[in-house]
Amino acid sequence: MTSSDDELLSDRTPLPSDLDTRLRDHLTFLIEVDRLKTILRASPLAAADRRENDAEHSWHLALMVMTLAEYADEPIDVGHTIKLVVVHDLVEIYAGDTPIYDTELGKSQVAREEAAADRLFGILPEDVGRTMRALWDEFEARETPEARFAKAVDRFQPLLLNWMAEGGTWRTPGVTANDVRARKAVIGEASKTLWDTAKHLIDEGERRGWARG
């Protein structure tokens, strides 16, 4: 967000002052996260000639968890995993998207996103904000089967979109097929099947000239 966006969205059309305070905080948060629809990612859409936004990405991940859960190497709680993927990119409302191959911007990613999490989840009532923050922290730590699978689909989804775009961000200047493999290897922490499939798609993309050798 720029300095001109420091205000909350709800400040532009304030909610009625006689609303229950707790409900007001919930609604203020829900209005604020509408910003997620404006955060563009590097990945192209398969269905249109434009980049996807974070809200579209999060929805796609939730559907992928429901669809691909059987390929998780460890049993997962599907509902909990969906919560993780829905929450994980909310911090980009303030921190912005960090493209996977932008190593320079990646240096400040953790600090930017930690500060964004403090600010965003702080809008909610304390108990709800603490729960949301715990979900975000769990995703980042990747210490549970659900978090590992959530991260796996987070890396697998853009790969599918790049395949449909005949390379997409794989064609980023300076990026090689081995760079793609290295950045996607985390998929293998949660699903051998999805990692084998990812490697097959990257190998074939390289063979077709969509990624540099």
Image: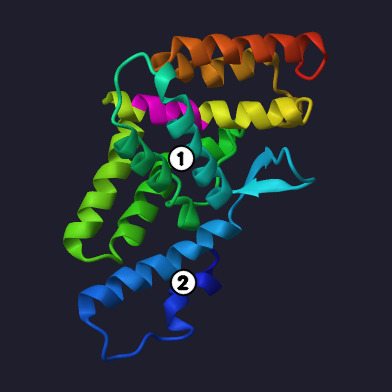
Could you say whether the residue bearing mark 2 is in a helix, strand or loop?
A: loop
Query: What is the span of residues highlighted in magenta in the rendered image?
Result: 148-154
Question: Dividing the image into 4 quarters, which one contains the C terminus?
Answer: top right
Q: Position of residue 35 (x, y in %)?
A: 52, 63
| Membership of 150 in magenta stretch | yes
Could you say whether the residue bearing mark 1 is in a helix, strand or loop?
A: helix
Let me know if residue 142 appears in the view: no
C-alpha separation, residue under disc 2 versus residue under disc 1: 30 Å
**Residue 201 left/right relative to 24:** right
Name the N-terminal-most of marks 2 and 1.
Answer: 2
Q: Position of residue 183 (x, y in %)?
A: 54, 21
Of tags 2 and 1, the one toward the viewer is 1
Residue drawn at x 54%, y 20% is: 184
Residue drawn at x 55%, y 43% is: 57
Which label number is shown at residue 176? Answer: none
- Among all residues in the image, which is located at the extreme left? 127
Q: Position of residue 191 (x, y in %)?
A: 43, 15
Which label number is shown at residue 6? Answer: 2
In terms of depth relative to the viewer, which is nearer, 145 or 211?
145
Which label number is shown at residue 62? Answer: 1
Given the image, on which type of amino acid does mark 2 rest? Asp
Do labels 2 and 1 touch, CB within 8 Å?
A: no
Let me know if residue 42 appears in the view: yes
Given the image, on which type of amino acid does mark 1 rest? Ala
- Among all residues in the image, which is located at the extreme right? 209
Label 1 environment density (alpha carbons within 10 Å; few <14, some 14–19, many ≥20) = many
